[in-house]
Structures are given as structure tokens and as C-alpha cells.
Amino acid sequence: MHKNKTVVIGIDGATFDIIYPLLQERKLPNIASILVNGVSTSLRSVVPPITASAWTSFITGVNPGSHGIFDFISGIHLNGMDGKLLSSVDVMAKTVCDYLSEGQKKVLTVGIPFTYPASEVNGVMVSLSMGCDIDVYPKDLMKPLTENTGYDKEQCKPVDTFGEVPKEEVLDEVIKRANYLTEKVRDISCYLLKNHEWDFFMAHFMSTDTIQHYFWNFMDTKHPAYDERLADKYRNTIHESYRKVDSAIGQILRQSGEGCNVIIASDHGFAPIYKFFYVNKWLQDKGFLHVRNDEKKMYRFKLAFPTIYKIFKKLGLESVGRILPRWLRSISIPAIKRCPAPFYEWIDWERTKAYASPFGININLKGREPEGIVTEHDYKNIRQLIKNDLSKLKDSASGTELIKEVLFKEEVYNGPYIDKASDLFFTFKEPYFLQASDVMKATCFEELSRENFATANHRYSPDGIFMMNGPHIKSDKNLHNLNIVDIAPTILYLSGLRIPRTMEGRVITESIGDDYLLSNPVEFIEGDSKGKAAVASAAVECDESDIKEHLRRLGYLG
Ligand SMILES: [Zn+2]
């Protein structure tokens, strides 16, 4: 019996919408055994539900206003210019790993988002960057770990050949790399569990999120980007990714042994995108945003090196391009290319009062935005005007009302970092719309087509999954109203530690057995919740531009 040992498995973007039908077909035996013998419910994510801020809330037990991570990149208020890629050194609150280490508990973690570069823990932290660079604390474990598991970054980093090769090859590569990462997270997990002492173990699987972004349109016959030609090949790709993660979970749980408390959870749900809503175009139509008059200046001529295949494709000769030998179609030749100027150069900032951020709307505030014009005095008034207009938003084609709620940032967040957040957020009634910040569109709405790579998203799907079982956990109980910030205090409680009062979540006591709860009442401690800057034991040496491009394609950057 492993008293007070806890295993946490994070499945990125996992949703019961996919899991329940697979359970009925008996295709997820390991997840099923946790679900059937324990407690489960949906898990409400942060607003907006994105991987960066959600997992950070998961491991800190506080909202983004208290931990400071609102996005993958900094600089939400830079008038649309890119900020820098964020990492663990930007997390401003303590994590469960910090608290467990202070409580002399042995910690093992594998690939938890926003733990790169790895920090000092009482145990082992294996962290992976967005570009799949690996970092390990303690440093001297890097060599035996990579030798024993054969981890190779090149085989799992985000695909960077979009538009350069036929789509099918790209999709095959996405699957290959996502599955490779699943296998390596499994192998690293089993290696650590076998060779190190532990009280708390957590691993994170990314493949489900990546694959749902790219493959939803092959299983959803109602999707405007439904691809009949490739549906036979890719219809089950999402299901397969869940099955592979389920199998990896089985191996991890066998290695961790009997008698542990096990939590399986995701950071948000997932849903198809049928239509884009271009927020900046809408702000322009409503008079809050103005575009520069001289359209000619808004384009650049750049030296580019398109491949022969890409040139054939542009000439409408894709079928000819496809039969060329691979070595020939991948040859690049120099060409002059007309490119649109960056978004921020399109906008007439001297007349613009509001603009879209990747996840909400920003007021062009004087003294905060580089080219801000709105005074503090007018700030609330303009926000209210936008809220009023947005609340009445209708689909131009169907006339249906679209908006579920419009929220000001202080209604969503609290804490010292709230000023970093966007000013206004909104959610749709139907989770089929993605805000995008393109100002060069003729209309505010556009249906997706097969040219769009990401055909599903989680921006309006805040409900992830939660399930838990173990020696102290009730069985067969349905839970309600769980929030992502409840997980960290629950982990500390199950580990026998007191809960810092600064944690905003609660221990999920209704899931704990009565006897255990009576003999182990929830206790609190005061204390400082500020996260120590993570030990930068690895230089953050990833190619930022590649990762930003990857995020942009998935709709994370404007
Ligand atoms: Zn995610």
C-alpha cells in the first residue's frame, strides 16, 4: 500500500464528448477503470480556456490574475505587435511542486506545460518547451534519461512545412510526431517511476490537443471543411490519439503500482469551428477601429524561396506538382513575393479606440498601449459601448444571436497581474466561432474551408474532464461545480499537507471518504505564495519565430 501517493495525468484538451462514446465501445479500458471506480465530472477552465493559463492555474491553484500567465506570449497590449514567448520563469505564483518539495514530499513530473525551463524540486522535473526542447532537474539526469528513453526532439517538434508539401504529407507528419511524443512521455514516466522515489507523480500528454485541432473536420460530416476524400484515412485519427494515451496511462499506472490516488484531468474541452468571426473587421464597421488609407503602402516586396511544388500549386497545377519526384518538388528558387505588412501597420492608431487581442478586445489606452489615445476617463465608457454593441451581434447569414456573455477583465480575474490581461472577453452561444484579428476581410464572418489547418478549437469550450479514484476516494459519485483551481489544493490535501490560504481553489472534500476526512481535516497555512523564479538551468534556446508561426496557425496569435 502506497500511503498518500498521488498520480496525476493531464490529457490536453480531452473532452467527455469524445471519451463517452469511446467508453461505450470499450476502447479506453484504463480511463474506464478510473472513471467507473471513482468520481468524475467536467472541470471548468479559466477564461479564456487556453493551454498556457489553464495548466498554470491547475498547478498553482490561483487564477491568471494571480499567476501572471494570460497567453503563450507576453505583451497583450502592444497594439498587435508580438511580445516574447513566456516560460516557467514568468509564472509568478508557487506551484504544487514547490509546496510539495517544501513539505519534503518527493516529486516526479514529466512535460507539464509552463514548467520549462525546469525548476529545482525535491525530486525530478522533466520539462518540455513548446518546441519540444527538453530540460531536466537535476541536470546530471539528462544523459541517463535521454539515453534510456531515446528522446529525440526532432521527431516531435511542431511541424514546420505547411504550404510546402501536399497537405496529406503534412497531416501524416502531425500524427507521427504527436504519437512519438505520447510514447516518449510514457517511456520517460515509466523510467522515472522505476528508478526514483516518489510521493507525487504528474505527466502531461499533448497529442490529443494537437490532433483535435487538425483532424476534427475528417470525422464531422457537418463541418464546412469536411474532407470526403481523406475522411476514410483520418476519420478515426482523434479516437486513435485518445486510445494511444489510454494505453500509455495503463503502462504508467502499472508502473506506479496499486493503492495510489489517481487524478485524470484536462485543461479545457474541444469543439469544431464552423465559422470565423473577424473581430477587428467588426470593430472597424462599428467605428472603434480605423485602417490606414494608403493600401499600397500596406504591402511589402520580400525575397522568398518557394519550392517548385508551391509554384505549381499557385499556378493551379497542383496535380502536376504532385507527380513530380519529391527531390524536384522540394527545390527552392528565389522569387520576389508581395506580402501584407504586419497587422499593427495597417491600423491608424491615432483614431483607433479598440482592437482585438488574440483572446479578447483591448482598449487603445493612453500610457499603456504604445500608441494609445483613450484616456482613463473614457476607458470604461468605451468598454461599455463595445459590450452593448457586441451583445447584439447576429450572424449576418442566419440572423441568429451569437453572444452568450461579454465580460470585463475585473469580472474574470483578480490579483496583482490583472493589468496584463485584455480588457474585454466574450463567449459565443454556439462554440463554432473563432475570433480572428484579420482587418483585410470584406465581411465579419467567413465559413471555414479545407484550406484552414485548424478546424477545431477550445476557446469557447471551457469544460475539460476530471476523474479521480484511490484508497481515500469515494466511488460512483458524480461531482458538480469543479474549477481548475481546485486541483492543486486537493493534491496537497491528499499528500498530507496543509493548504496555503493564498490558493483560491478548495479541496474537493465531497469526493473524499468520510473516515479519511474525519481523521484528516483540511488545515490551512499562511504564507507567501510568490513563485521563486525558476532556476534557468537551460538557456531558453528555442527558435521563437518557428513556435510563434505554429501558434499563429492554430489561431493563438492574431
Ligand atoms: Zn490545452
Image (cartoon, rainbow, N blue to C red):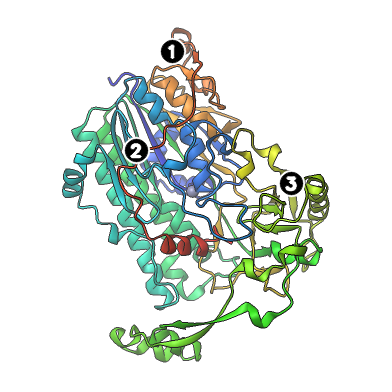
Q: In this view, does 123 lie to the left or right of 320?
A: left
Q: Is residue 466 visible?
A: no
The local secondary structure at tag 2 comes to loop
Q: Which corner quadrant of the image does residue 102 belong to?
A: top left
Q: Is residue 286 visible?
A: yes
Are the residues at dot 3 and dot 1 in contact (C-beta closer than 8 Å)? no
Q: Name the residue under label 3.
A: 405
Residues 26 and 100: in front is: 100
Q: Name the residue under label 1.
A: 516
The local secondary structure at tag 3 comes to strand
Q: Name the residue under label 2.
A: 535
Name the residue rendered at 72%, 75% in the picture: 442
Q: Nearer the viewer, mark 3 or mark 2?
A: 2
Name the residue rendered at 41%, 50% in the picture: 206
Q: How crowded is mark 2: few (under 14 residues within 10 Å), some or many (20 or more)?
A: some
User: What's the residue type where badge 1 is placed?
Assistant: Tyr
The local secondary structure at tag 1 comes to helix
